[in-house]
Image (spheres, helix red, strand yellow):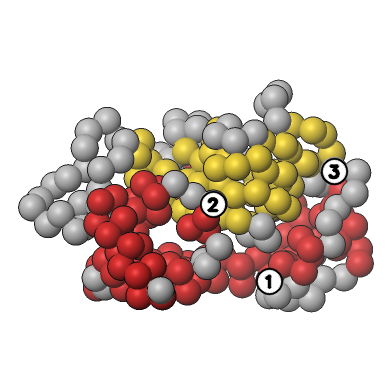
């Protein structure tokens, strides 16, 4: 059993249902059944939640804290002479999730095959989780839950497409400004190298951009 597992959640935050009900209203019976399937976890800073090569069989929701998904790389990721868009870290950040977010290693979760990415806590975090099997079973019993998660998955897909377009078509400066607009508090909670990796920017370039923005505000 995982060392961060605290057991079945005795009390479930109502905020998790606020997140779900952004996409579809839920009956009380559905909420009760969903809550009974939840486990609660406490992670320390940098503790791994999902490890590359292992199957991610749980969907998570963050009550407090911050987690990061990433691909490991054994070599420097510089591939050309464009120093603005190269990265210089030993892993590539693929996702950032904070309070109120659902997350998992999506490809592994939906296929139930080993994950190609890892997920770790960037700060002490408290999470709820539900197993793949329980979630599928509840979808069959409660159509409203299935409808809500279809909406959630659609929203996550939109975010993925938006990030792909951002990385492909926007300048490093525009990428960081978009990041600030959508995640104004994350720069104070993350290492610069992880933000740079997430945005596909060289760390030195990002430091220059941040300095320029600071001077602009002064």
Nearer to us: label 1 or label 3? 3
Q: Is residue 164 visible?
A: no
Which residue has dot 3 on it?
Answer: 9
In the shown orientation, is residue 200 left or right of residue 125? Answer: left
Considering only order in the chain, which callout, 1 or 2, is on the residue closer to the N terminus?
1
Q: Nearer the viewer, residue 81 or 107?
A: 81
Residue at horizontal 90 percent and vertical 49 percent from the top? 11
Which residue has dot 2 on it?
Answer: 189
Considering only order in the chain, which callout, 2 or 3, is on the residue closer to the N terminus?
3
Q: Mark 3 packing: few (<14 Cα in 10 Å), some, or many (20+)?
A: some
Residue at horizontal 35 percent and vertical 70 percent from the top? 215
How far apart, in angstroms, are the residues tagged by discs 3 and 2? 27 Å
Residue 37, given in percent of the width and then of the height, sits at 81, 46
Considering only order in the chain, which callout, 3 or 1, is on the residue closer to the N terminus?
3
Q: Quadrant of the C terminus?
A: bottom left
Question: Are circles 3 and 2 on residues that touch, CB within 8 Å?
Answer: no
Q: Does dot 1 land on a helix, a strand or a loop?
A: helix
Q: How many marks?
A: 3
Q: Is residue 3 visible?
A: yes
In the shown orientation, is residue 34 left or right of residue 168? Answer: right
Q: Nearer the viewer, residue 77 or 83?
A: 83
Residue at horizontal 50 percent and vertical 71 percent from the top? 182
Q: Is residue 190 above or below residue 140?
A: above
Q: Quadrant of the N terminus?
A: top right
Residue 145, given in percent of the width and then of the height, sits at 74, 66
How far apart, in angstroms, are the residues tagged by discs 1 and 3? 24 Å
Task: Specify the label residue 147 is tagged with.
Answer: 1
Residue 10 location, quadrant: top right
Q: Mark 2 packing: few (<14 Cα in 10 Å), some, or many (20+)?
A: few
In the shown orientation, is residue 77 left or right of residue 43? Answer: left
């Amino acid at each position: 059993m995982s060392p961060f597992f605290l057991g079945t959640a005795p009390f479930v935050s109502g905020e998790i249902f606020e997140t779900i009900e952004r996409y579809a209203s839920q009956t009380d019976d559905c909420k009760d059944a969903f809550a009974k399937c939840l486990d609660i976890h406490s992670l320390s800073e940098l503790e791994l939640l999902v490890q590359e090569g292992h199957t991610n069989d749980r969907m998570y929701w963050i009550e407090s804290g911050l987690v990061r998904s990433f691909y490991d790389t054994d070599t420097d990721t510089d591939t050309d002479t464009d120093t603005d868009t190269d990265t210089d870290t030993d892993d590539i950040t693929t996702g950032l999730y904070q309070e109120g977010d659902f997350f998992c290693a999506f490809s592994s979760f939906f296929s139930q095959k080993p994950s190609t990415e890892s997920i770790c806590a960037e700060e002490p975090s408290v999470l709820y989780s539900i197993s793949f099997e329980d979630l599928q079973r509840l979808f069959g019993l409660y159509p409203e839950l299935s409808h809500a998660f279809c909406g959630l998955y659609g929203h996550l897909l939109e975010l993925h497409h938006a990030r792909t377009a951002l990385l492909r078509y926007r300048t490093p400066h525009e990428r960081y400004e978009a990041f600030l607009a959508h995640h104004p508090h994350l720069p104070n909670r993350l290492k610069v190298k992880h933000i740079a990796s997430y945005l596909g920017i060289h760390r030195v370039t990002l430091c220059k951009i941040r300095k320029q923005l600071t001077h602009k505000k002064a």
